[in-house]
Amino acid sequence: MSLPDNRLIGLDALKGIACVLIVWHHLAFYGPMSDVIYPRATSLTDWLYDYGRMAVQVFLVVSGFLAASSLAPGGVATFGQPVRLVFRRYLRLVRPYLVALAVAVAVAWWVRPWFDHPSVPDAPTLLQVLAHGLLLQDVLGHDALSAGVWYVAIDLQLFAMTVLALGLARELHRRWPGVSARLWGTGLLLLLATSSLLFFNRQDHFDDTGLYFFGSYALGLLAFWASTALNKVNTGTAGLWLLAMAVLGGAALALDFRGRLALALVVAFGLVGLQQRAVPWRWLQSRWLTQLGQMSYSVFLIHFPVCLLVNAVVSRFWPAQMMANALGLLAAFLLSLLAGAALHRFVESRGAPSRSVPEAGAVTL
């Protein structure tokens, strides 16, 4: 099933906005250019440092929305061979990821002798490289070779959890046909979402697993099914999905208020409203914003080595000049977009997914 163009534009625009916030969050976080301009832009830098990373929630919800549209548009699995499907998702994710990782290692190697800063990764070991290639670096306790690589691993875990839950539901339906596959599937997914929102997401030591993030991802799943039911004028079913979103999110926030979760809930309901024209949407059709969203995964992957390189050069030649560092931040952002566009065009888009594999660009952070 493919989404109408206006939905895709809206989703791409949201990804584009989130991508911009993540890049600027890392520019504020890693320095040293941001350290130089901090006295003149204290409030903005603090906001980007503290809240820019919450844009991850947009990626999580949108990714869940896209997964539902491709894996189970009617709430029932439409795919076969779950393991093969997950492997195809892995290949889709790692093609541009490995290229960006190689660039990050090369840039770190080049600047390490003359740029002494905590943001420069150490020279990688063979085991560290292998762990990154298998998206197991956090699980195995290896330091990251680039910013945000944790999210690529989480994206794969979330996708795999959804595929396996829906596949298991189909098998349970075959064994007990009295219960529909849709009920089995949504029941399993809601169980995962509930355990994530009420327990795992409240325990920081689970943040290297998909269980920590599945609640936000599931809100995206529910948002798609609710919007589909509304489009079919099936208000009863839509009401159930919307109620599930409200109850899950409300209960989780009442138990332990988390700003990131509140944002995920707003984005999920916003997506439903967007499909019904219940919220402003025309500005989301902006061509540049749509293109940015389409290449957001590549921008996300490549921006760290670009920002590291610009930080190193500016720090070496203009270590304390306010204007040079401010222009350096802007240059790092614009060069990140250009590098992301190149990575998207020459690597990511050449491995375009089939209809059964949601686009990797719904990241991805």
Image: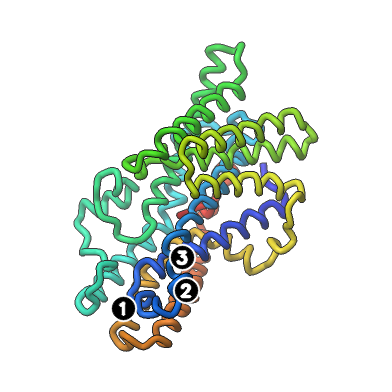
Q: Which kind of residue does numbered mark 2 sit on?
A: Phe
* 296 sits left or right of 27 in the view: right
Q: Foreground mark, 1 or 3? A: 3
Q: Which kind of residue does numbered mark 3 sit on?
A: Leu
Q: CA distance from mark 1 to mark 2?
A: 15 Å
Residue 48 tag number: 3
Judge whether residue 294 can be spotted in this image.
Answer: no
Farthest residue in the right direction?
233
Residue 312 tag number: 1
Image quarter where the N terminus lies is top right
Give x and y (percent) for residue 10. 67, 56
* 167 sits left or right of 314 in the view: right
Give x and y (percent) for residue 314. 34, 83
Residue name at image x 75 percent, y 28 percent: 236
- Residue placed under numbered mark 2 in the picture: 333
Regarding mark 2 in the picture, which secondary structure is present there?
helix
Q: CA distance from mark 1 to mark 3?
A: 21 Å
Q: Earlier in the sequence, mark 3 or mark 2?
A: 3
* 10 sits left or right of 154 in the view: right
Q: CA distance from mark 3 to mark 2?
A: 14 Å
